[in-house]
């Protein structure tokens, strides 16, 4: 059981660690110190639901509903392209409006809606959590539960470290120019993922 738990934790970390739309958003919110706890909670809970679905054996959803994967892919392409464009627009406005200590913070509802879309409209999240973690957990029978719980803990610890640890970079992002480059980087990340989804099939 211990080996299953350790591997579950490490597998979850390895899959989530790569920079992606969701991680870039969590990093940005952490730097802005804006609704960080809520964003971390949404990401971790979403992963927990998806990991539970995978471990419970629902990884065959795309096979049962053939159009599901394709629909999610193009929904993700459109959303990521639009969100990336918004980040470029924010960069063009200049770094002054992007200070993490700014008074006009975005409404919680808007932030959480964006976070949910970046999480659930991304086809890769289903591949990573439901399909991959679900299939790997089957190798640890009868300890799939330990594997799944540890994977959920790995996801939670990563998002918490990313969101709350981002403030350590605050001195760097005290300069408006750094925020401009962050927005450009996030925008490029979003467009890169969108292109990968659109042309990579």
Image: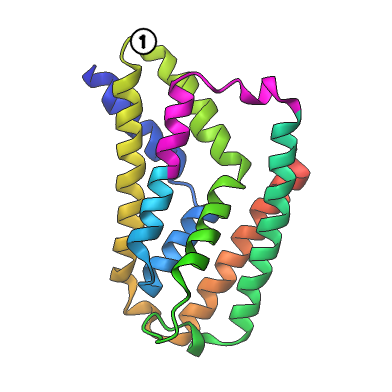
Q: Is residue 189 above or below residue 63?
A: below
User: In which quadrant of the rendered image does the C terminus lie?
Assistant: top right
Magenta region, residue range: 46-66
Q: Nearer the viewer, residue 49 or 2?
A: 49
Does 135 sit left or right of 8 as displayed?
A: right
Does 190 sit left or right of 96 as displayed?
A: right
Q: How many marks?
A: 1
- Please say whether residue 50 is one of the residues in the magenta stretch: yes
- Please say whether residue 137 is one of the residues in the magenta stretch: no
User: Element at badge 1?
Assistant: loop
User: For mark 1, does the 10 Å Cα neighbourhood hold few (<14), some (14 to 19), or many (20 or more) residues?
Assistant: few
- Place residue 174 in its image quadrant: bottom left
Looking at this view, name the residue that lies furthest to the top.
142
Q: Is residue 71 above or below residue 37?
A: above
Residue topped by disc 1: 141
Q: Residue 78: where, in percent of width, then height?
A: 73, 55
Q: How is the image coloured?
A: rainbow
Query: Which residue shows up at 34% across the image and 48% down it?
Result: 158
Q: Residue 126: where, in percent of width, then height?
A: 56, 35
Q: Nearer the viewer, residue 114 or 28?
A: 114
Q: Nearer the viewer, residue 149 or 49?
A: 49
């Amino acid at each position: 059981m211990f080996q299953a738990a350790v591997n579950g934790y490490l597998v979850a970390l390895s899959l989530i660690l790569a920079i992606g739309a969701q991680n870039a958003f969590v990093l940005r919110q952490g730097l802005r110190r804006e609704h960080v706890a809520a964003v971390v909670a949404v990401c971790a809970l979403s992963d927990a639901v998806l990991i539970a679905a995978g471990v419970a054996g629902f990884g065959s959803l795309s096979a049962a509903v053939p159009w599901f994967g394709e629909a999610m892919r193009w929904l993700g392409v459109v959303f990521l392209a639009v969100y990336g464009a918004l980040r470029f627009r924010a960069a063009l406005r200049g770094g002054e409006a992007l200070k993490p200590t700014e008074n006009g913070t975005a409404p919680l509802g808007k932030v959480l809606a964006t976070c949910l879309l970046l999480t659930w409209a991304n086809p890769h999240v289903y591949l990573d959590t439901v399909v991959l973690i679900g299939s790997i957990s089957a190798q640890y029978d009868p300890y799939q539960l330990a594997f799944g719980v540890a994977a959920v803990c790995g996801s939670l610890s990563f998002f918490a470290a990313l969101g709350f640890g981002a403030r350590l970079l605050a001195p760097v992002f005290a300069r408006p120019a750094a925020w401009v480059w962050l927005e450009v980087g996030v925008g490029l990340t979003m467009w890169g993922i969108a292109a990968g989804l659109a042309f990579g099939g």
